[in-house]
Image (cartoon, helix red, strand yellow):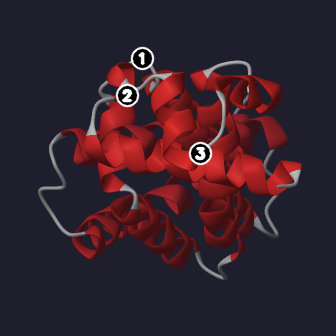
Amino acid sequence: MNADKTKLAISLSFQKLLEEKPFQKITISDISQGCGISRMTFYYHFSDIYTLLDWIFTNDISTSFTKAAKEECWQDGIGVLLNSILQRRKMLVNVLHSTGRDQVVALFDRNLEHIIYNYVKQEAKGRRIEEDDLIFITHFYKYAFNGTILDWIDRGFPVSAEELRKDLEILMNNNINDDINDFLDARTRK
């Protein structure tokens, strides 16, 4: 088996185990047995379970975020993201409720920032707003979205992905434009 196929087999074994039991209860032996390789083969490809988790996020889950970021409007991008989360709900819940939580938060941060920045930049088009101000607005909404989405996951998905997307849209649609105007007004008064 070539290296890419072996990594994929290890990844799928790990993801299957995450559907069945908590992150902290999964061992390298469990993963190796699940895909029919030796522990040494695992260590040839990954130094530990956290490296594997990072690889999954980078190569599998980030693909969904990349697709979301390419959507024409941010609402569609967030919809793609939320549906991707639902497809991996058990895995993400198990990782979030373990020592892997920081990796999920960092993944969401990186990718939400890209989606939101594109929208903020689009809304600011034709106006003379400083890049630092655009970044500040982006970070504010990124953290608000990240916290809201993580809370949605932590609470067991109490509303549908579509309902959450619509609620986020309500908050975002008018506020971003107002925030840009407020920054422009504040900077011209200096």
Location of mark 1 (residue): 99
Vertical relation: 60 (above or below) 34? below
Percent of width and height locating residue 176: 52, 57
Identify the residue at horizontal 70%, vertical 30% (top origin).
Answer: 42
Q: How many marks?
A: 3
3 and 1 marks in contact (CB < 8 Å)? no
Q: Earlier in the sequence, mark 3 or mark 1?
A: 3
Identify the residue at horizontal 62%, vertical 44% (top origin).
Answer: 10
Amino acid type at image mark 2: Phe
C-alpha distance separating marks 3 and 2 = 20 Å
Location of mark 3 (residue): 36
Identify the residue at horizontal 36%, vertical 31% (top origin).
Answer: 96
Location of mark 2 (residue): 23
Residue extending furthest toward the left:
158
Front one among 151 and 101: 101
Which of the 4 quarters of the picture holds residue 54?
Answer: top right
Percent of width and height locating residue 188: 74, 40
Can you tell which of label 3 and label 1 is closer to the viewer?
A: 3
C-alpha distance separating marks 3 and 1 = 26 Å
